[in-house]
Image (cartoon, rainbow, N blue to C red):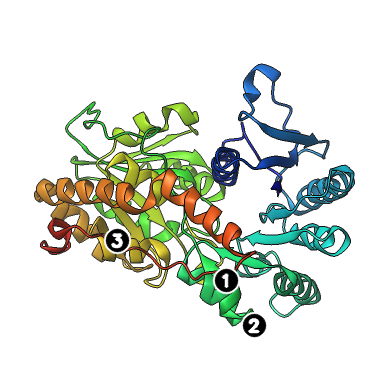
Amino acid sequence: MRILLLNQFFWPDSSPTSQLLTDVAKEFVREGHEVSVICADGNYAVADQGEPPAVKVIRVKALPFVRGSVGRVLSYASFYVAAIWRSMALDKPELVITLTTPPLLSLLGNLLKILRGSRHFIWEMDIYPDVAVELGYFRRGGIVARFTGILADWSRRRADGIIALGECMKQRLVARGIPPERIAVAENWADSEAIAVQPRLRQSSNIVVLYSGNFGLAHDMETILSAIRNLDRDARFRFRFVGGGARHKDLARHVSEEHLQSVELRSYVPRELLGDSLAAADIGLVTQSDVCCGAVVPSKVYGLLAAGRPVLYIGPSEATPARIVRQFGCGWHIPCGQAGVLTDLLRHLADHPDEVHTAGQRAREALLLHFDRPLGVARIAGIVGAKSQSPVPRIMPVALDTAALRSQARP
């Protein structure tokens, strides 16, 4: 089967969507399919590209992706035009999968469905225009939000199926009027071989609480910052933020202005060093604002599971990370705004390191039994492969069949 994958980012880009799509492309090749990918030319050196074997990667020229609304729109628009041109020149794909960078890329997938008879699946990484509305880029109920919503929902109804990253995302789509039977839930994953469990790479006796990755507007900085202030004079704690994003910059300003001594700010680490970075922590932070529940699904949790580090999730209880923590007993959940509860929990964990160790063991077991890369890519392949025979299946979370995990109460 000829398969076309469409997304602005692909290998060797280090973004989560690039890594996930690369894994899926390799899986399709392994199954014997002919796979093409249309993505943006990221100006990577030829020696750095390392295209996945047997995957035809078509890198189209597009304006550089820059921050700011105007630059972002121009980058998106240039990619649309180039992707349309190149996709129409390819041999007819039997299956098209579109991701959501740029937004409304699914319109191109449906264009190929209409003009060339391809089957089309939308793999929703973020729900648009919901993300833009919740973060204040679009005015709620405004012309832009309504117009983009109409286009996005039309495209969702025309597609052969939709893949959502969690039950919370599915419910967000259902609230937009998308029939639930058209939506399959397939959670993200991490690679247990690329991120292996390591002993704590301890440089000091401090308890290292790590936030790794983008710290953006969809994340709750206020609760974390308040807890840091409460614990700043407690020499047991180090709060390490590795990555970037709008909140990362805001946090850096607070650290400087308030002379916070317990915070370390570092830039992104290369993908090949991610395992070492995670192994240097005791507890991993994952956060999400209440308003973005279901519009985005944090992918940071899966890397922490792979590293065998417990997850401390701050966000809405309906979100996928909260469900994972509850179901597998691999960490703790704190609602947004509960800085006092977060402070007390961290002090408790500092006094009871055995609970941290146990939750870390459960995290790795959960990864191996449900969220490892081979399982994740197989879920995606099963959804898009089954659609030609029967309706899109509803993929439910797989409960751990491990008595040891059930016999102990959540820390």
Q: CA distance from mark 3 to mark 1?
A: 24 Å
Q: Residue at x 86, y 44 (%)?
A: 82
- Image marks 3 and 1: residues in contact by CB distance under 8 Å: no
Along the polypeptide, which appears first: circle 3 or circle 1?
1
Q: CA distance from mark 2 to mark 3?
A: 29 Å
> Furthest-top residue in view?
47
- Measured as percent of width and height from the top left, residue 343 is found at 24, 58
Determine which residue is flagged by label 1.
Answer: 183
Q: Identify the element where label 2 is drawn.
A: loop
Q: Residues within 10 Å of mark 3 (few under 14, many from 20)?
A: many
- In the drawing, what numbered circle is on residue 325? 3
Q: Residues within 10 Å of mark 2 (few under 14, many from 20)?
A: few
Determine which residue is flagged by label 2.
Answer: 177
> Comparing marks 3 and 1, which lies closer to the viewer?
1
- Measured as percent of width and height from the top left, residue 208 is found at 26, 40
Along the polypeptide, which appears first: circle 2 or circle 1?
2
- Measured as percent of width and height from the top left, residue 403 is found at 14, 60
- Image marks 2 and 1: residues in contact by CB distance under 8 Å: no
Instruction: Work out which quarter of the rendered image holds the C terminus and state it.
Output: bottom left
- Measured as percent of width and height from the top left, residue 123 is found at 62, 58
Type of amino acid at the residue the image marks with label 2 = Gly
Q: Identify the element where label 3 is drawn.
A: helix
Q: Residue at x 37, y 68 (%)?
A: 337
